[in-house]
Image (cartoon, helix red, strand yellow):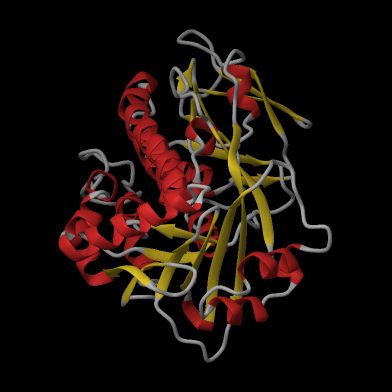
Amino acid sequence: MARQSRAVVVGGGIGGLTAAAALHQSGREVTVLERAPSLEPVGAAISLSPNALRALDVLGIGDEIRDLAAWQGDGGLRTPGGRWLTRTSAAAAAERFGGPLVLLHRATLIDRLAALLPPGTVRTGAAAALADPGDAHRPARVRTDDGEWESGLVVAADGIHSAVRTALFPGHPGAVYAGFTTWRMVVPVPGTRFASHETWGADRLWGTHPLKEGRVYAYAAALTPAGGHAADDEHAELLRRFGHWHDPIPAVLAATGPEDVLRHDVHHLARPLPALHRGRVALLGDAAHAMPPTLGQGGNQAVEDAVVLAHHAGDLPAYTAARLPRTTAIARRAVRSARVAMPGNRAAVTVRDLAVAALSRTAPALLLRGFDDIADWRPPQPPYAAVRAGDTEQR
C-alpha cells in the first residue's frame, strides 16, 4: 500500500523544489524526480517580488534571499532613445508592498531550496510519467525507468509542456505560442553603473538590471514567428535589433558572447485548466498556469503555489479553489501587459508612451497600485507548512 505521508514531486525546478521543501517541513516523506542530469537550471535570473518572498518566509529563507537584493535605487521605463517614461523608487515600492523586489540568479535560488531537503531527496536523471492519478481509495502511481512509485500525493512541476498535465486533462489544448521570443543573459559588465530599467519599443523590448558582484542580468523580447533562430548566432541577432538603443545596452552587448545568450520562444496556457488537481495529483507553476513573463510573475506564482499546496495537501479541491482564480487573473494580465509593451505598430507606441508619461507625472502612485493585488499576497493563515522538527511554535 502507498504511504499516505509520501509525496512524489515530478520536476526539480523552482516550483518543484519549493513544494518539496514545504511538504518536507510539514512532515511528509518527499522524493523529487528530475529528468535532467543535474539541478542546474535552464534560465538566467529570476525576479522575486514581495508575494513570493513571503512564501519563502514560510520555509525560513525569506530574509536570506532578501539580503541578496542588488539594486535599491530608482529605476523605470525608457524609450529606445533613452528618454525616461517613468521613474520608480525601490523604497516606495518596498514601503507600499511590505518588502523589496529581489533579482538573483536562478542557480542561487535552486541551491538554497535544495539545501532545505534531506540528502537523497532529489533524484536526477529520473524521467517520470504518470501511470495512475489515484483517487480516495487508491494511491497515485508514477512510473520511472527504475520502477513505479506509489504515493498519497503527486506534485506535477514538470513545466510548460507538462506531460502530467496532458495525462490529467487530455482534452485541454495545452501551451500555445504567445507571439514573441525572448533572449536572456547574465554577464559581468565591470565599471558600468546604471539604473535598473526596461525599455519599450514597437515590436520589441529590453531590460537591464544589476546583480551582485558586478554582474548584469539582461533580457530582450521581440514579436517574431515561432521557431525562428538567427542565421549566424543570437548575439549577432541582438546587436541587429538592439545595438543602436540607449546606454548601457551597447556596453552590455559588448560584454556578451554568443555562448552567453539563451533564446526561447514564449508559450502560455491561453485556456485555463478546469482544475489544478485530479485524483491525488496537483499541478503547480508552469504546468498549471504557464504565462508570459511580462509581469515577472511566473516563478513567483510557482512559489506561492508550493506553500499553498503544502497547506492544503490533504484537500486538493481546496488547493484548486485557492489558486485557480488568482493565477488565471494574473496570467490574463500578463497577456495584456505583453500587448502594451510590444503593440507592433508605431501609432500605438506613440499613444502608449504619451499615456504612460502623463500618468507618471500626474498620478505616479497609480503605476504601483496596479500591482497591489499581486505583490500584497500573503501565505495561508497558520498553521503554516514550515513547522521544523523541534520547533515549539508554528510560523
Residue 330 at x, y = what percent? Answer: 37, 38
Residue 50, given in percent of the width and then of the height, sits at 30, 56
Residue at the spot x=45%, y=36% of the render?
28
- Front residue (pair 343, 268): 343
Q: How far across and how far down the image is residue 242, in percent?
A: 61, 68
- In the image, farthest residue toward the front: 347
Q: Nearer the viewer, residue 133 or 370?
A: 370
Q: Does residue 35 appear left or right of residue 48 in this picture?
A: right
Side (left or right) of 229 relative to 326: right
Q: Is residue 377 left or right of residue 197?
A: left
Residue at 55% from the left image edge and 37% from the top image edge:
157
Residue placed furthest toward the right: 232
Q: Is residue 361 left or right of residue 176?
A: left
Residue 71 place in picture, x, y as percent:
37, 75
Residue occupying the far bottom of the picture: 191
Q: Foreground residue, 44 or 180?
A: 180
Q: How many marks?
A: 0
The part of the image, by quadrant, that contains residue 100 is bottom left
Res 188 seen here: no
Q: Is residue 147 visible?
A: yes
Up-down relation of residue 46 to residue 325 (above or below): below
The answer to whether 391 is drawn above or below residue 358 in the figure is: above
Residue pushed farthest top? 137
Q: Is residue 162 above or below residue 38?
A: above
Which quadrant is home to the N terminus? Answer: top right
Which residue is found at the position 45% from the left and 86% from the top?
A: 193
Q: Viewer-proximal residue, 367 or 35?
A: 367
